[in-house]
Structure formats: C-alpha cells, structure tokens
Image: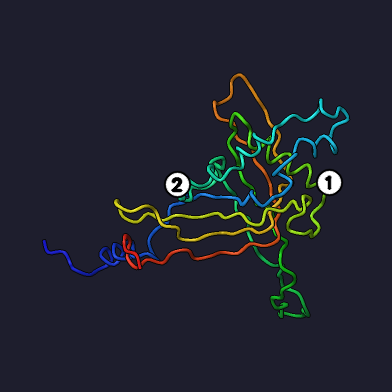
Amino acid sequence: MVYPTSGPYETYAQLLSEWPTAIASASQWFMWFDLSQIRLLSTNLQQKLQNKESLLGPAGWQLSDNTVKTLTDWKLQLNANQLMGCVFAKQVNLPGDGFEAGNNGLEYGGYTAPATSNTRTKYSKLNITFVENNASFVDFVIKPWLILSSYYGLVSRPFDSVKNVKCPWCDICFLARVDPFSPPAIRKVYRFTNLVPVAIQGDQYSYMSDDMKYTSVDFVYDQYYIQEAETPGLLGERR
C-alpha cells in the first residue's frame, strides 16, 4: 500500500512540529515573585507585627528576620543564575476578563434591540496555592504581609517606604517542550503588577489527612499583561 506524501495526517504532523501550532502542556509552568522589593518584609517584621497586632508585645508574634530572609531568598527562585520559579507555588488560577454587554435599546414589533457594551468587568483576584513547608512560607511571609497591608493600605507610597506593601510584579511563565536534548522554552508570560495578598484560606488538620498540606491565597493587583517570550521556528530550533 502506498501512503500519500501529503494529506490530512501529514499536515497535522507538520503542524505539531511547528512552534506556533504545537500543542501546549497545561502542567508545564512556574511562577516567581520579586519579593526583594517589598520593604516591610526586609527587616523587623516581628516588631512591626507586635506593634500593630499583639497586646502581649514581645510575647506575641515570634518570627526571626533570618527565617523571613531564608524564605524570601533568591535561591528559592533562582538556581546557579538560572530561573526556576517559586518552589512553594503548586497551583495558580488565572483570572478571566470581559466587559458588560447586552441587548439594550428601542424595541417594538419584531424588531429587537442591538447589542451594546458598557464598562469592562473588574479584575477578579489571582489565586495561588502554596505547599506547606517546615518554616511555613504562608504563615511567616504571606500572612504577615497580608496583615500589615491591611493596616498600611494600598495607597501610592515612595518606592523605598516600609509601608509600600505592593510586590512590583509576579510572573506566571508557561513552558513548551522542544526536543529531548534541549530544556523547555518559555512560550508566554502573564505578568501581574503591584500584587498584594488579601485572603488566605483557613487550615484544617486531621490525623487521617494526606501527607501534603496546601493553602490557597487570593491576591489583588493593579494590572496584568501577556508577553510572548520565545518564537522558535521548528521545535528544537532557536532563532
């Protein structure tokens, strides 16, 4: 039997071998924060919390600057100068987008109102799920960040102010497989600017639970945009 050299199967195989039309994997992604630029996390976080939150003073919140520094260190997002993403992030739910629209206007007889538009839908929150670790990234970084943000507010402040609670950016990077001898390539990036945590899921512990513990956190942000990161020609090729 002679197989055709060009046909639907060959065309489909060709499409799968080209970068723009290759099928993307939903599980190939990572994210990272620019936590180093959040001044309130840099020093004296315990003192800030005790001043605002605890009637017990030094007997209240207990966390060291060394713990916070370790949990926010670049080595947990970079390895030998190579980007690897926040090691605590397990899952992310990206917000949707849209604008208000409907059929409004003059109606009579068989005539119906045309489609009209209104305002753009407000941004929904960015939801990130973190895995629990011994030093507790959620309890000793995210939760103090959220609490102090509620006191300081989200008003515009100088970049070097300790009350500037916004993280300048958070990138969600999506990867594409190339060839067996090359690392995955970043195909697109969602960047969220001026991020702040606003809600942390409550915890439940049980003697019959699974071994891993996860916590969901909601973030608000000022804006998001999408970047095309790499555009190779054929898979495995670099331009």
Residue at which label 2 appears: 80
The quadrant of the rendering that contains the C terminus is bottom left
Q: Residue at x 79, y 55 (%)?
A: 154
Q: Position of residue 99 (x, y in %)?
A: 69, 67
Instruction: Classify residue 76 as left or right of residue 239.
Output: right
Q: Position of residue 164 (x, y in %)?
A: 76, 53
Q: Residue at x 63, y 39 (%)?
A: 69
Q: Position of residue 180 (x, y in %)?
A: 30, 51
**Which is closer to the viewer, label 2 or label 1?**
2
Q: Residue at x 70, y 44 (%)?
A: 41
Task: Return the residue nearer the eye: 211 or 162.
Answer: 162
Dots 2, 1 in contact, CB < 8 A: no
Quick one: label 2 or label 1, which is nearer the N terminus? 2
- Residue flagged by tag 1: what amino acid is it? Tyr
Q: CA distance from mark 2 to mark 1?
A: 38 Å
Quarter of the figure with residue 19: bottom left
CA neighbours of label 1 inside 10 A, class few (<14), some (14 to 19), many (20+): few
Instruction: Classify residue 150 as left or right of residue 26.
Output: right
Instruction: Classify residue 10 as left or right of residue 84.
Output: left
- Residue flagged by tag 2: what amino acid is it? Ala
Q: Position of residue 152 (x, y in %)?
A: 82, 49
Where 186 sits versus 92, above or below? below
Q: Which element is circle 1 on?
A: helix
Residue at which label 1 appears: 151
Quarter of the figure with residue 91: top right
Instruction: Classify residue 123 as left or right of residue 7.
Output: right
